[in-house]
Image (cartoon, coloured by chain):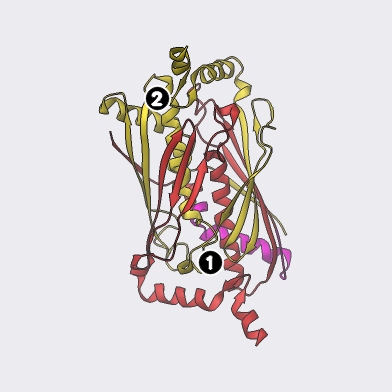
Chain colours: A red, B yellow
């Protein structure tokens, strides 16, 4: 029995459910329509708080979450804040790693590779003269982001590196951060 | 005395320190060089955890944080996870709002407008067939992001809307999400 279970659950991913989900969306493409959401409230100074709960998925509103997630953001003292949470230029590198890692985990589970370790470090270089409005020559955001992975598992190093390439090719956030997304900003004032 | 204090601290922002910071970076542009970081560790399945603490700012390593911030990420059941945290496609909208809001707060503080309310809701539309590898015609990430603000303060509505435009023009994350950033991925396997 343990063999069946080990084969079905790989890297913590229920691969039978994963393949069933792929089949379902393949058969009914409209099930692929999702909408994710966040609401944010200003508290004071740089301090603001996001609430995340509902989303639309696979033909209906999701109701699986009993409680919302709450995320505090802020700015450190050097950016005139009181460090009430990570600053958005730290949330962005987090978000990239938090997407590439499960992409890698799902890709490896589907390909029957067992992972024992996935760690990453992300760095983003920013000349804050852009965001401070002191220079028109530098952008507001990062000039470059570097993410370095340490990956261990029961496949040869070249196979693990190839699987990271596949994870990049499937990651929603890697796509958005590298290619950009149209953003519409509306204001009720 | 309360008048001086009220003028200096506006919307929770110490404007004297803000202007002193602007002057310092204007005088010594190399102080604008920052680097933000995140380290991420895979836990199991879609569950992963990011640690955020140190960063480089204004000519040196910052040491103001006694403790790191920790962020858990995950996936809901419909994405084969156990909802151990917001999913990355929810962290991204959060990050956008968490940057535009303090941008607006700083811009208004510098222009002597007192805010009483800033709230926003972000929505991102995704056809998950892209990230699932089921269609080459749809992208992995959001097709579009919409963020709608409710802003109240002691300025006319058209002034508040103009200040949101200035916040957009200064926001690091708005720049990155709309324009994209070069990302280098390294793997040690």
- Nearer the observer, A64 or A117: A64
Q: Which residue is mark 2?
A: B108
From which residue to which does the magenta span run?
Answer: A151-174
Q: Earlier in the sequence, mark 2 or mark 1?
A: 1
Q: How dense is the environment of label 1, judged by Cα within 10 Å: few (below 14), some, or many (20 and up)?
A: some
Q: Where does residue A119 sit, x and y in percent of width and height?
A: 68, 55
Left or right: B184 as drawn, with respect to B5:
right
Helix, strand or loop: magenta stretch: helix
Question: Which quadrant would residue B116 be assigned to in this image?
Answer: top left
Left or right: B151 as drawn, with respect to B94:
left
Q: Quadrant of the C terminus of chain A?
A: top left
Q: Which residue is mark 1?
A: B82
Chain hosting mark 1:
B
Question: Gap in Å between the C-alphas at discs 2 and 1?
Answer: 41 Å
Q: Where does residue B154 sit, x and y in percent of width and height?
A: 31, 24
- Nearer the observer, A159 or B147: B147
Chain hosting mark 2:
B
* Local SS, label 1: loop
Query: Does residue A151 lie above or below A110 as drawn?
Result: above
**Residue at the spot x=66%, y=41% of the render?**
B53
Q: Does the segment drawn in magenta span residue B60?
A: no
Q: Does the segment drawn in magenta span residue A155?
A: yes
């Amino acid at each position: 029995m343990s063999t069946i279970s080990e084969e079905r659950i790989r890297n913590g991913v229920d691969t039978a459910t994963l393949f069933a989900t792929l089949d379902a969306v393949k058969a009914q493409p409209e099930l692929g329509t999702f909408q994710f959401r966040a609401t944010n409230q200003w508290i004071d100074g740089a301090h603001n708080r996001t609430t995340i709960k509902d989303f639309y998925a696979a033909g209906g509103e999701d109701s699986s979450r009993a409680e919302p997630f709450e995320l505090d953001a802020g700015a450190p003292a050097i950016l005139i804040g009181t460090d009430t949470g990570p600053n958005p230029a730290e949330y962005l590198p987090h978000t990239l790693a938090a997407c590439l890692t499960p992409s890698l985990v799902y890709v490896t589970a589907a390909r029957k590779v067992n992972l024992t370790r996935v760690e990453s470090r992300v760095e983003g270089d920013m000349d804050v003269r852009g965001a401070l409005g002191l220079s028109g020559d530098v952008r507001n955001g990062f000039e470059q982001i570097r993410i370095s992975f340490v990956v261990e598992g029961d496949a040869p190093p070249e196979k693990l590196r190839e699987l990271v390439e596949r994870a990049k090719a499937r990651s929603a956030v890697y796509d958005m951060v590298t290619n950009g997304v149209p953003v519409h900003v509306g204001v009720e004032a």
